[in-house]
Image (cartoon, rainbow, N blue to C red):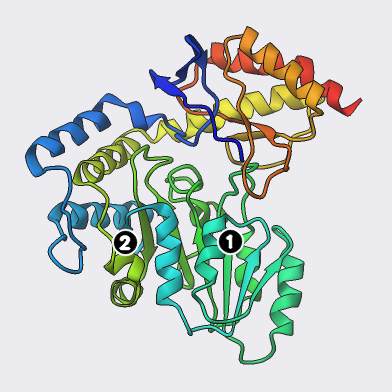
Amino acid sequence: MTEAKPLQQTGRTHILYRGRKLAYFAGCDYFRLARHPAVAQAAARACRTVGLNVSASRRTTGNHVLYLSLERQLAVFFGAPAALLLPTGYMGDLAVGQALAGQFTHALMDARSHGCLGTAARFLDCPVLTFPHRNGGELARMTAECGPGSRILILTDGMFSHDGSVAPLKDYLAVLPANGMMLVDDAHGAGVLGQHGRGTLEFAGVDRRRIIQTITLSKALGAYGGAVLTSRAMRERIMAASNSFAGATPFPLPLAAAAVAALNLLKEHPGWRAQLMENAGWVKATLRDSGVPLPEAPGPIIPLPGATPTQARQLRRALLAADIYPSFIQYPGGPASGYFRFVISSAHTRRQLEALAGVLRHHVPRWAK
């Protein structure tokens, strides 16, 4: 494995790379709130007033009113009965897996699910089977093969990070037995998808009665930490049965304050979601008109797999010449050789979007020839 190069972000849409200021179309800070002044000020103010760290588990002496306040606000924003914070988004799925150990006879997981769902599934103490990516028909067949009386847990991402596609949750619920449940890792969909930004569940038009939704605070909110959005009973179960919750120190208080500030900004500026989708839609339409094959997906992610080493070097040089950072990544579950992946934000200017589209439309259509 090759360690990624260190990057220094400057402003909300640029980085410093080898002494150059480049436009940045990577990461998952969809609204660029990680560098928003109000978010930074909230974190700094909390650091002065409540300190950096509670230095204890929330099950002992590490609970704090700021955590409870953030949980209440997350539950209201996402329309969930309750929320429970975890130190990271990754640990949210692990906590659910530990709390559900022994409750199901089968776990069926999307083959392209994030690695944290695979890790969580190890705690379930039941067979774990994978179904083809976003394939409701195969999921229905596998569900039937589990047999009558089976208790099934479906595990899937909400919005998939590799290409911005979305799990067909309504189709999954239609084949899920009445005693089954679904765990949706909505790290990328939460705050981005849906009329009110409630994520993949709202986008798909499904209720959450049989769904546990996990989110991260580091993407749409630009802060840090994770949360489980679920019933009050499930919240209590996680606190009682999950070592990931009980044995961990929660994330620093200033980051909780930052998340509250970011959540308030999203509520105050609903037009940011529309701007995000407008920006992404314009780039995608421009590239498709130029012959660039892109998947039909609602997320603001533009994947460009399939480049040969020579084509990748040519595109890299062209992007750098246009003062754009060449976001070529190697990530588990993606092509072993890596691929270009560009992420659009609501804060990118039309000039930046035009520069990116101009380079890509000139080079990428040649890959298919």
Q: Is residue 87 left or right of residue 197?
A: left
Where 175 falls versus 287 (above or below)?
A: below
> Residue at left 29%, top 77%?
240
Q: Is residue 37 left or right of residue 163?
A: left
Mark yes or no: residue 206 visible: no
Nearer-N-terminus badge (2/1): 2
Residue 260's spot in the image, x, y percent? 25, 43
Pointer 2: what residue? 83
Q: Residue at x 50, y 13 (%)?
A: 18
Q: Nearer the viewer, residue 296 or 96?
A: 96
Say which residue appears at 46% left-offset and 71% top-offset. Answer: 97
10, above or below 118, in the image: above
Residue 170 falls left or right of residue 312: left
> Which residue matches tag 1?
156
In the depicted structure, whether residue 182 falls above or below residue 195: below
Q: Secondary structure at mark 1?
A: strand
Please provide percent x and percent y for residue 28: 49, 36
Mark 1, Cα crowd under 10 Å, few <14 / some 14-19 / many 20+, is many
Which residue is rendered at x = 57% and y = 10% of the image? Answer: 323
Rendered image quadrant of residue 264: top left
Mark 2 touches mark 1? (CB < 8 Å)? no
Q: State which quadrant residue 325 falls in.
A: top right
Element marked by disc 2: strand
Three-letter residue code for mark 2: Ala
Residue reaching furthest left? Answer: 49
- Residue 369 x %, y %: 92, 25
Mark 1 is on which residue type? Answer: Thr
